[in-house]
Image (cartoon, grey):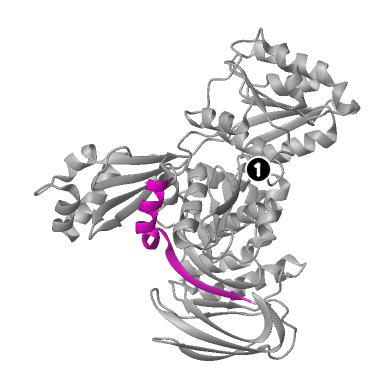
Amino acid sequence: MSRQPRAFFALDFGSATTSAAFVGHAGGRWRLLAHAAAPATTKLDALLLGILDRVQQADPELLEDVSAQQRPKPAALVVDLTRLEAHSTPPRRLAVLAGSRRQRRRLEEVATRAGWLVVGASADADDPVAMSRLVLSAATHAVLLGADSRPAGDERRHLPMLGALVAAAARSRPELAVVLAGGAAVRESDFLEAGEHDRIPDPAQAAAAIRAAPPRPAGRGVLLAPDAESGLPAGAALQQVLEGLRARADESRLGVARSVGSLAFVLDRCIEALEVGIDGGLRCRSEPIGPGDRTIVSSHVALAAGSFAPLDPSDEIVDAVLSWSTVAFDRYRLSDRLRDLRISPWGEADGEGALLRLAAAKAAAERLVAATPEISAREMPDILIAAGGVWASTPPSVVALAMADLVRRPGIGRLACDQARLLGPLGTIGDEEERRRIIKDLADDVLLPLGSLILPSGIRQGRSAGRMRVQGESANSDIDLQPGGIWAVELPPGQTAMVELDFRDTVRLGARGRHFSVEVLGGLGGLFVDLRDIPLRMPDRADQRRATWEAWQRAMWSEIDE
């Protein structure tokens, strides 16, 4: 956004959904004026024209103001207005080669966190023919050959063979991208005859060079990268390089992570986001170093396995969806339903289909949580955001319940949803200061409030855990808290309430104690008080587990049977 428009379209082109938002500068700040979503096959101009027609019908003077035109014609504005675009990157496969199984596992973990579909082999466990087939496969887009910064004997003796194998594959497949990580960089001379050779020794410079454009055509050179232990946390430097190689410069998933960092800065709050899509997922966290500190610490993991409808659902994925489902599926039928969901992600969005989507989304988010133990080890964030189109057709109270099911840490936090899918496009703004200015104005519009969550730990089983009193403009309740339950108190968006909690035993809720007095914000789902176990303890029998999920879910989503 090099020039300063008074209005623009923020577009998120997903694999299944195209989301469009109309943002205008009115009343002295940027505002979200309208948004819509449609299947990815929908003609974009028709979608944008529909948005502008709605604004014109609702407030023609507002459209004149933000377009700086008298009696503007929506069809002309569709062509003239600036477009801020973010795109999903289709899944890409990376072959990981190493001299030892230990090194291969470390490299595979980093590559997986960078969003690649990963296959791997090691010289101490696989023969050269199998490794050759791996890198020569048409499904493989890039090869990562890695070693420790100072390879030990078990790795060093295999590097000549591995370097020659990858160099031969690069000659046979000029489109193949090659990354040499850590001590494997000593084999760069093997590639001098394979094509143009670009040496970029600085990891930050490497990531910037790659992100400046869509992934470069492989075969133009060999990219040198740090080893799998460099950076903070370990592997972050190599992850950054691999993300730059995999993703477009305007990749929406990484845009979400950047926008969350900007939100943490302008709101001075700790923020986490869970984004689930059809081609992968993202978990990210950004927080100030200390109260009032303007330095933001961020971490994120993009995971191809975070897809709610994977290309080829494994037995583990099918079992995970079954464990969250309130509908009794047999394994073969569920596997077919997940494949159908990928083929037609907008189909059957009600009834049993809605329950299947929810179970698939929660299973995908669970994989994201399992892949990010370093984030789970942190305290409850001030704001937890649900992002991705899979949540759009789900009632806000059910989305809030899903977040409580998945991110179980004691504390008090706000729950929100990126309903308009603005985080991805805003994250593509290259100038950090400009992005922060726009996000500061749009913060209330970006974050659709779902409510507040109170989640204590240390609740003992018994007849009563204590009492809760809620006092607010429209919420006045006195509730006997029973262990193992979850309560939803109606508290509309924009309203606050004081909550007095008196527990029979000492619990942890940020601090340890028996009496707590906190102020909470409302939302579309209200206030949630969760006294279930951390982590959740579910029955082993499938029918009992389904009944338990259904009991909790029905309290938030009674309309599912209507």
Image quarter of residue 131: top right
Q: Give the total number of marks visible in the rendering.
A: 1
Can you give x and y, in whole percent of width and height, for residue 64 in the image? Answer: 14, 52
Q: Quadrant of the N terminus?
A: top left
The vertical placement of 374 against 223, above or below, is: below
Residue underneath mark 1: 113
Q: Is residue 4 visible?
A: yes
- Residue appearing at x 66%, y 11% in the figure: 172
Between residues 290 and 398, which one lies in front from this camera angle?
Answer: 290
**Left or right: 508 as drawn, with respect to 394:** right
Between residues 144 and 47, which one lies in front from this camera angle?
Answer: 144
Can you give x and y, in whole percent of width and height, for residue 400 in the image? Answer: 53, 67
Q: Is residue 331 visible?
A: no
Can you give x and y, in whole percent of width and height, for residue 87 in the image? Answer: 44, 39
The amino acid pointed to by label 1 is Arg
Q: Magenta region: which residues? A: 433-455
- Residue appearing at x 64%, y 40% in the figure: 312
The vertical placement of 160 against 120, above or below, is: above
Q: Quadrant of the C terminus?
A: bottom left
Query: For the view shown, which residue lies furthest in the right direction?
Result: 153
**Left or right: 229 as drawn, with respect to 497:** right
Query: For the view shown, which residue lies furthest in the top direction?
Result: 193
Query: For the view shown, which residue lies furthest in the front direction?
Result: 293
Image quarter of residue 380: bottom right
**Left or right: 151 as drawn, with respect to 62:** right
